[in-house]
Amino acid sequence: MRLKILLLALFFSTYIFVDSIAQTMPFVYDAENTGASYPIPYLPTLSELPSYVPLPDPFEWADGRGRMSNFSDWEYRRAEIGAQIQNYEIGVKPPRPDNITASYSDDTLRVFVTVNGKTLVLTSKVILPSGTGPFPAVIGMNSPSGSIPSYIFSDRNIAQIAYMHNQVTMYGSPSSADPYFQLYPYLNADSTGQYSAWAWGVSRLIDGLELVQNALPIDLKHIAVTGCSYAGKMALFAGAFDERVALTIAQESGGGGATSWRYSHSEPSGSVECIDNTDYNWFMNSMKQFNGSNVSHMPEDHHELMAMVAPRALFVTANPDYTWLSNPSCYVASSGAQQVYKTLGIPDRFGYSIVGGHSHCAVPSSQIPEIEAFVNKFLLGNDTANTNIADNPYNINLASWITWTNPVLSNGASYFGKAVLASPSNLLTDMDTTSITFKWEKVTGAQNYIIQLSMDPAFRSITKSDSTITDTIKTFTGFAQGIKYYWRVQVNSALGLGPWSNTWNFITTIPLPPKPQLGNVSPYPGRTGWFTFKWNKTKYANQYLIQVSNQQTFTDIFLSASTLDTTKILSGFAGAQVYYWMVQASNLSGQGQWSNISHFSTLPAPTSLVLQSSASNEITLDWNDNSTVYDGCIIERKQSPQTSFVVLDTLKGSGTEYADKTVVQGQIYTYRIKAYIDSVESDYSNEASLVITGIKETGKIPAEYSISQNYPNPFNPSTKIKFALPKTAITKIILYNVLGSNIMTLLNKELEAGFHEINFDASALTSGVYFYRIQSGEFIQTKKMILMK
């Protein structure tokens, strides 16, 4: 009997203690995000994240300093979870913009949000009960009551407001043209999931309700959000990220909603919506890095998304008749969220109901009183409503998924003293390698400070540290040269360790970079007046400055630009001009030497230089004219074994052909050409070489048969073919395609002995490779030609 009395006394004392705690945990807040001022924790990359198969501990601080110890810690811990979900899953949810206006008329709420000169308009129909109000309200995703029977709200004089999410970003096909992305052009469909944008839209709708209180009597302390399926996810994200929502009802939200990414991935492949096959219009594309077994590297999971609603009320449902919804995962994640509500002393503010026997998004009769209980308690203030609801058909071993123990939290004030760093700043200023002094601001109540330095932004290895500092200054020596270091400070007080400060960084002194070696300048394809500049990478350099001038003295700078790369595209160059350019490398130690000065011309150079020879010891040059404004071309030649070119001739006026009749047998000749206008010369064309091997003709009769390569080649649309006949004979020249089919006969008649030439016009043919064959007496020879239109 005595034991029963003791147990009963313990029960009532525990109940009274938990109930007193519950009274300190607000049902709702006036602010959208009470944790907005807390520092964002370090957010590691995938390679830095450990693998952890069970559900992550929702009570453990993100920086690894331990676990929550006070009820008031939850506000900060919730902000950390929100930062992780934004970084790894949905993208940034921007805060409330400064420029928001709203109006209410004709049963319609209109909210105007203006950012960067662009305006997004939210238009929502409002079903308002009769009377003067103020009325509790439910915001339904895409309909006034979501998928919940509207009578549950109308019978209780609760206003119903429809949130039309396509007014923010279009379901199924988000694009930069959507109103939300017009407001925030730095966000896009790749870097931001729609759940971030849609949750932002719900918050702006609530802003509108605040602005029109005189015209629309809504009780701002009693607002609910609800939706089903993908809209159930939407309602969950909206409620999690806006603390002005008193009650969130997420119906059958499936994978990515009130489920665990980890557990869903453990179910048979392809059977449920998991991180591998969810709709990535809804989530940021970078979340794909956690596909497959990498899901265990996620630092958070959705039991923590649900926990973000705490201490406000949350009710989630699932439907085991639809396997795709990952209903066992909903049970596991809900059980994890339930532990947070229990630890905070408010278990009645969370409930889940997983029952079948009904269509997707239909509310079965068994869930009607459960929803009504949550509505009665958290929208109407009926404390007697029973919201301790945990319906599910599963027998899953939760011990392998929920491996943490719930901390016993104190009612004492939580200490959030955070050091504010002073110097060296994170402006990447170069520092002396022998002695560096670190300073930070004093924190009231601090017993001592801990400082850590690392070459790793995740601080997995510590380079230098001190945990005994009582002042706000510390000097370290012996730094390596040219290294980027990270540093942070933590406060220790009678209440324990505070969070780490923000991380700052600096780079130790490094040598000045040497002068760069210049490469080439080339026209940018398809853009008149655009050129690409290239130079070699320089040691120690982290930035380059390129300067272009009209004068070799650089008295006036025509263009100047910085770049991190060794290639830079510049525009605005006039035609037929000579420009001079140079490059300077720099790093945090300063600017290195300027490179040598080089020059280039904006006059287009001739291209496609080809050579043809005949038995008459003549070399014919053909090229493409890339400008209609050339004054002429300069022909240069070198003859083996010469190593330098000499000017052979200067052409006046336009022309794309030149005959060099000064060549001799058995010699190798190399040519190049450049164009000019007045004093401006173009770059050189390609170089072309030819060996003269033909037999010098005797008089007008060649000693042997021959046929030259057509020139020009490639050609468009006409070309010339030269050939030599030592005897009078019927001579045929026939054109074939690559399949060997006879295309046409270019020549078929008796010709006298001597040197001959025919012109071939291929205007009627298509581009391609062709073969031409000569047959004269017993002589037969075939050559290839290329037609390029």
Image: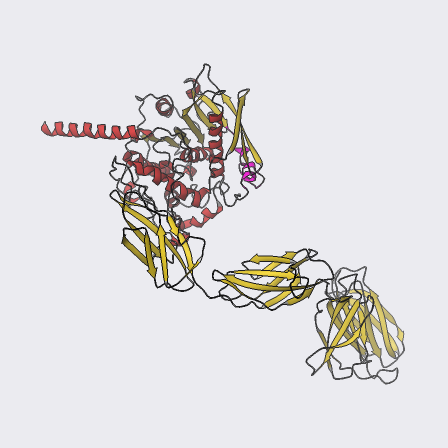
Q: Is residue 310 left or right of residue 532?
A: left
**Residue 88 counted in the magenta span:** no
Where in the figure is residue 281, as x and y percent of width and height? 51, 41
Q: How many marks?
A: 0
Q: Is residue 655 left or right of residue 559?
A: right
Where in the figure is residue 175, as x and y percent of width and height? 56, 41
Where in the figure is residue 493, as x and y percent of width and height? 26, 45
Q: Residue at x 25, y 28 (%)?
A: 20
Q: Judge whether 78 appears above or below 611 on screen.
A: above
Q: Quadrant of residue 478?
A: bottom left
Q: Is residue 316 left or right of residue 122?
A: left
Of residues 543 and 27, the one drawn nearer to the viewer in this rendering:
543
Camera sees residue 238:
yes
Q: Quadrant of residue 686?
A: bottom right
Where in the figure is residue 683, as x and y percent of width and height? 70, 67
Q: Which residues are magenta?
A: 163-184
Q: Judge whether 777 appears above or below 411 on screen.
A: below
Q: Residue at x 27, y 53 (%)?
A: 467
Camera sees residue 397:
no
Q: Quadrant of residue 475?
A: bottom left
Of residues 176 and 434, the one drawn nearer to the viewer in this rendering:
434
Q: Residue at x 70, y 82 (%)?
A: 642
Looking at the rendering, in which quadrant would you find the C terminus? bottom right
Looking at the rendering, in which quadrant would you find the N terminus? top left
